[in-house]
Image (cartoon, grey):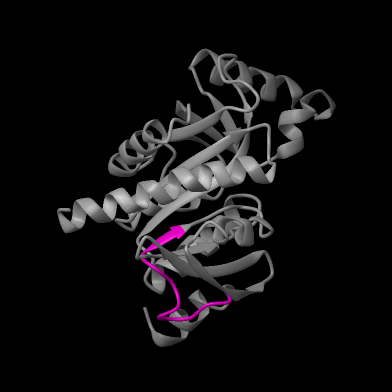
Amino acid sequence: MDKVHKVEQVKHLPLKFGEVARYVIVPGDPNRVEIIASMFDTHTLQGSNREFNAARGKYKGVDVSVVSTGIGCPSTAIAVEELAHIGAEVFIRIGTSGSVEKSVKKGDIFIATGAVRDDGTSKQYIPIEFPAVADFELVTNLIKSSKNLGIDAKVGICQSKDSFFGEVEPERMPVSSYLDYKWQAWQKGGVGASEMEAATLFTIAQIRKLKASAVLAVEVSDEKTIKKMTTIVLECINNMEKDINHE
């Protein structure tokens, strides 16, 4: 890739080389960046551009960034590509979702092990037969962290869609029967949650040899819940660093 294309890759984020940590928390909502960063021991807000807000800080001595992706897989792909280009290696999504399978209830915390690629962006990377799978080490540490913190979490597959209203108001869509057919298939397949970013995040991470996972709040988005998910994620990051340093 020539120099011009490398410059193009970082024109969207309010960051440049040397300004991102190895670990990056990636919420969709730009307004959650400051909420998440407030859970660090120290942090600095780094700026914003379009849907991309950024902050960086320390948690128990570990360097951590938080960068919003905006809604949906296209903007998520831009964020992940540019973050990876300037040095990010581990991505953990904090977001909200709907419920698909009936055992997943409003208020649940949901750790995604993989995602149904019901999006368009990931298909621009690799054929649909390729699975969108979260990193095993990350998922294992997220589950361990939630248990150690006494926070109940459901674990399973999420669905990543492109149309929010296609899910919540399928009856008014010209392809309503097709949407209903697919929704029933996801339910019968045991899909737990429905959101709009994880499939592309997991797919790009796998292709680029990065690590990615997602923690979702089902049908709630209050600050208390965002902070609860952040606590799980930060403890996960801390545990991974301990493993690396053999502490």
Q: Decide whether the magenta segment is chiefly helix, strand or loop.
A: loop
Question: Is 25 inside the magenta-drawn segment?
Answer: no
Query: Which residue is more in the foreground, 140 or 8?
Result: 140
Q: Is residue 185 above or below residue 47?
A: above
Q: Is residue 59 above or below residue 8?
A: above
Residue at x 42%, y 51% (from the top left corner): 234
Stretch of the chain drawn in magenta: 14-24
The single residue placed furthest to the right in the displayed view is 172
Residue at x 51%, y 48% (from the top left corner): 230
The single residue placed furthest to the bottom in the displayed view is 3
Residue at x 33%, y 58% (from the top left corner): 208
Query: Which residue is more in the foreground, 132 or 238?
Result: 238
Question: Is 17 inside the magenta-drawn segment?
Answer: yes
Which quadrant is the N terminus positioned in?
A: bottom left
Question: 95 left or right of 64?
Answer: right
Query: Which quadrant holds residue 23?
Result: bottom left
